[in-house]
Image (cartoon, rainbow, N blue to C red):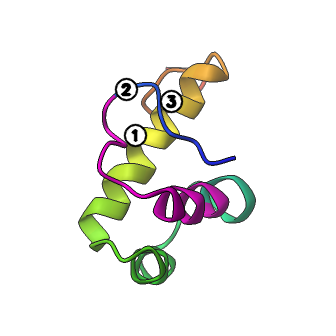
Amino acid sequence: MAYSGKGTWAVGLTKEQLEILEYNFSKVNKHPDPTTLCLIAAEAGLSEEETLKWFKKRLADWRKSEGLPSESGSVRD
């Protein structure tokens, strides 16, 4: 099942787009490099900016669910 987000940031994306994004986030890479991000964006029919925004917000939600700060950083921060 695709992650729809608890907030409104995923509004406007189709079920298929969410499935593509979520699959890549959970099964492939939570931090895609620019080339991979471009490929994911093309597959989902989104701009690279929209795709990057989704990944950033999804990562923040994932980190929060894991009990981590929403921003990345060292555990020593």
Q: Is residue 14 left or right of residue 19?
A: left
Residues under numbered marks 2 and 3 in contact, where contact means CB atoms less than 8 Å apart: yes
Q: Which residue is mark 2?
A: 7
Of 68 and 23, nearer the camera is 23
Residues under numbered marks 3 and 1 in contact, where contact means CB atoms less than 8 Å apart: yes
**Callout 3 environment at 10 Å: few (<14), some (14 to 19), or many (20+)?**
some
Q: Which residue is mark 3?
A: 61
Q: Position of residue 39 (x, y in %)?
A: 47, 83
**Mark number, residue 73:** none
- Residue 11 vertical position relative to residue 34 in the rendered view, above or below: above
Residue that appears at 47% across and 63% down = 17
Q: Quarter-wise, where is residue 64 in the image?
A: top right
Measured in 3D between alpha carbons, the distance from the residue under mark 3 to the one under mark 1, in whole angstroms, is 6 Å
Q: Which residue is mark 1?
A: 57
Mark 2 or mark 3, which is nearer to you?
2
Q: Looking at the picture, which amino acid does disc 1 mark?
A: Lys
Q: Within the magenta stretch, is there residue 55?
A: no
Q: Position of residue 38 (x, y in %)?
A: 40, 81
Where are the magenta residues, as a range? 8-24
